[in-house]
Every structure is written in C-alpha cells, then in structure tokens.
C-alpha cells in the first residue's frame, strides 16, 4: 500500500518509496565493491527485514545466497533487554562464509549484539551488518554497523517491513503513525 492510500493513519512520511529505493541502490553498489570476488550470504532477520532483503539482494550485481533467522527478544515493556531466543535458525552452515546480516531497524542494538555474538561463534570468514534504519540509541552499543540506509530520530516508525501490531509492513514508504491509531 502507498502512503496516499492510508494518509489518515499517518502523521509524517519520513522516506518515500523512491527515496528508499535510491538509498538501497547506493548501498548495494558499495557492497558490490567491498565484496568483489567473494560470494556473500545475506542473513535476513524475520519478519521486518523481508522488504530490505528483497530490494538489496536484487540491487546487487554479484551473486549472493540468502538465508533467514527469526529471533524474539525478551524485555520489560517496550525496552528490549538483549536476552534473545532463536525461533528459527539458519539452514546454512556459515563457517568460512562471508556473512552480511540484513536488519530492518536498529534501536538499542541489544538484539543485534546478541545475534552478532551468536553468529561469530560459528566461525564465518567475515561478518558485517547492514540496516535500513538506525535510531540514535544504537550509538550506545558497541556493535559496528557497516551499512546504514538512514539515521532516523527516536520515533516509532512503520512501513517497509516495520509493523505496528502486525500491520503496516506492506506500506511502501516509512512513516510515523497518527495518534488516533494508537488509541
Ligand atoms: P533493539 O534491540 O535494537 O532495541 O530492537 C530492534 C527491534 O525493535 C527491531 O528489529 C524492531 O522489531 C523493533 N523496533 C525498534 N524500533 C522500531 C520502530 O520504530 N518501529 C517498529 N515497527 N519496530 C521497531
Ligand atoms: Mg529487526
Ligand atoms: Mg515488530
């Protein structure tokens, strides 16, 4: 769905479909250069990374493989704690592979930092992170993110894979929600 079709639900569109596509293409070009001569395994983190995974993988000029993980993070209320459970593990043995984790959004980075520790213990040839969006709190965390689509303010956003109560993942843009949606 397009933001014009549900404009009553939205408060502010941060990035349009075209702006996102342009930025993902720029990152794909960087990634093509950085991994020249190497075959990449993209690891998408379900469910949010579905859109960015699809777009990034198709924007790459070189071959890549793709696999998926699903994780759930335990926290008190809305704050993630970094205590993570793997709901669906990779089908691929990543030992000796060049792995690029593809994320929808990094807020505190706690989920990611668990994931990186877990994946590093499997001895990949290399491990880097790509995220479509990143919030300011991520800076407090030590995890180095090699490729960032957009740095965004500390607001709750939906669209391009990101949900509120299971909805809005199929919104082509990224936006904040109008207050009436929450009540
Ligand atoms: P972290 O461990 O980095 O604090 O949490 C990251 C996860 O929190 C994301 O994968 C996503 O599921 C959720 N999240 C963080 N910020 C937002 C946001 O603005 N919108 C949505 N829909 N999810 C978010
Ligand atoms: Mg995520
Ligand atoms: Mg969610």
Image (cartoon, grey):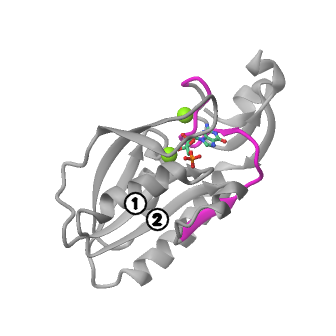
Q: Residue at x 43, y 53 (%)?
A: 114
Query: How far across and down, in percent of the image, does residue 144 sit?
Result: 53, 70
Query: How far across and down, in percent of the image, does residue 147 sit?
Result: 54, 69
| Vertical comparison of 8 with 117: above or below | above
Left or right relative to 142: residue 37: left
Q: Nearer the viewer, residue 55 or 101?
A: 101
| Vertical comparison of 168 with 95: above or below | above
| Vertical comparison of 167 with 106: above or below | above
Q: Can you identify the residue that label 2 sits on?
A: 129
Q: Residue at x 52, y 72 (%)?
A: 146
- Asked whether the viewer can see residue 52, the reply is no
Q: Which mark is residue 116?
A: 1
| Magenta residues, start to end | 147-166
- Asked whether the viewer can see residue 153, the reply is yes
Residues under labels 1 and 2: Cα distance? Answer: 9 Å
Image quarter in which the C terminus is found: top right
């Amino acid at each position: 769905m397009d933001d014009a079709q549900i404009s009553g639900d939205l408060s502010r569109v941060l990035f349009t479909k075209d702006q996102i596509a342009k930025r993902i293409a720029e990152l794909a070009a960087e990634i093509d250069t950085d991994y020249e001569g190497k075959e990449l395994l993209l690891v998408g983190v379900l469910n949010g990374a579905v859109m960015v995974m699809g777009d990034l993988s198709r924007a790459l000029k070189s071959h890549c493989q793709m696999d998926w993980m699903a994780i759930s993070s335990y926290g008190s209320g809305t704050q993630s704690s970094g205590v993570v459970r793997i709901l669906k593990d990779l089908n691929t043995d990543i030992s000796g592979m060049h792995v690029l984790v593809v994320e929808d959004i990094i807020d505190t980075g706690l989920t990611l930092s668990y994931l990186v520790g877990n994946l590093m213990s499997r001895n990949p040839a290399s491990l880097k992170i790509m995220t479509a969006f990143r919030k300011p709190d991520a800076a407090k965390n030590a995890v180095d993110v090699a490729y960032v689509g957009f740095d965004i303010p500390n607001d709750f956003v939906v669209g391009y894979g990101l949900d509120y109560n299971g909805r809005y993942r199929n919104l082509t843009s990224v936006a904040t929600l109008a207050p009436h949606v929450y009540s």
